[in-house]
Amino acid sequence: MVPAPPPAAPGEPAPPLRRRGERMRAAVLAATVGVLAEHGLAGTTVGAVARAAGVHETSLYRRWRTRENLILDALSEQADAALPVPDTGRVRDDLAAYFAALARLLATAQGEALLRLSAERDETLPDRRLPYWTERLERGAVMVRRGVERGELAPDTDPALVVEALAGPLFTRALISGAPLGEAYASHLVDLVLGGALPRDRPAPETPAPE
């Protein structure tokens, strides 16, 4: 039986915990999100995450290779939990709920970091941006296709174009303008975009006048 390591002396960091496999991964990803929330993107280093998770820094490099991969992995899982796909039976309500959730995510430090990292290109590493956002935006396209099948939208509606038209302004506000994000804004966007995707014999939905 291997004896337990001696306790750290006062003022010294505690020795790393012996974690392996999924247990280590879960601890590291949780620590990554916590460090990011407290210290921001610039302060989220591999060393800081390793200390917060109680693991060796070399273990993180061995598994994730780069700081960017580590943060993207942590935030991807968080984004999945924050962006469930609704099925209300009405395309307008589905899209409004989904993109309101996306707006809330992008308004957080974690969401902004996820978007900024996804928008950066590192020529020395595989480009992870396209697969990540393709998967998330495809969820919105699923809701649009359901609306087409129910006859709520025109048969020639392009689901990808509808989703890009909704996501683009949210990403612009998060990355460039810094204008407020929120449920009301997302709802207004959905009404605006769907007005151009309705069957030609159906009137556009009434959009509430801005307060």
Image (cartoon, rainbow, N blue to C red):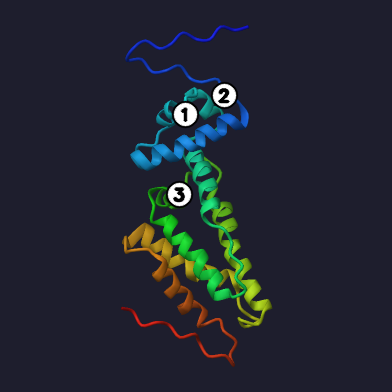
**Location of residue 171 with respect to 63 vertically, above or below:** below
Residue labelled with disc 3: 114
- Residues at marks 3 and 1, CA–CA distance in whole angstroms: 20 Å
Q: How far, Cα to Cα, is label 2 from label 1?
A: 10 Å
| Residue linked to disc 1 | 53
* Farthest-out residue, right: 149
Rendered residue at 60%/74% (across/down): 158
Q: Which amino acid does label 1 sit on?
A: Ala
The answer to whether residue 41 shows anywhere in this view is no
Q: Of callouts 2 and 3, which one flags the residue occurring earlier in the amino acid sequence? A: 2
Q: In which quarter of the image is the N terminus?
A: top right
Point out the image quarter for the C terminus. bottom left
In screen coordinates, is 175 left or right of 67? left
Q: Which amino acid lies under the numbered mark 3 shown in the image of this protein?
A: Leu
127 up-or-down from 66: above or below: below
Residue at 65 percent across and 72 percent down: it is 145
Q: In this view, does 194 lie above or below 139?
A: below
* Marking on residue 19: 2
Where residue 98 appears, as percent x and y from the top left, is: 52, 64
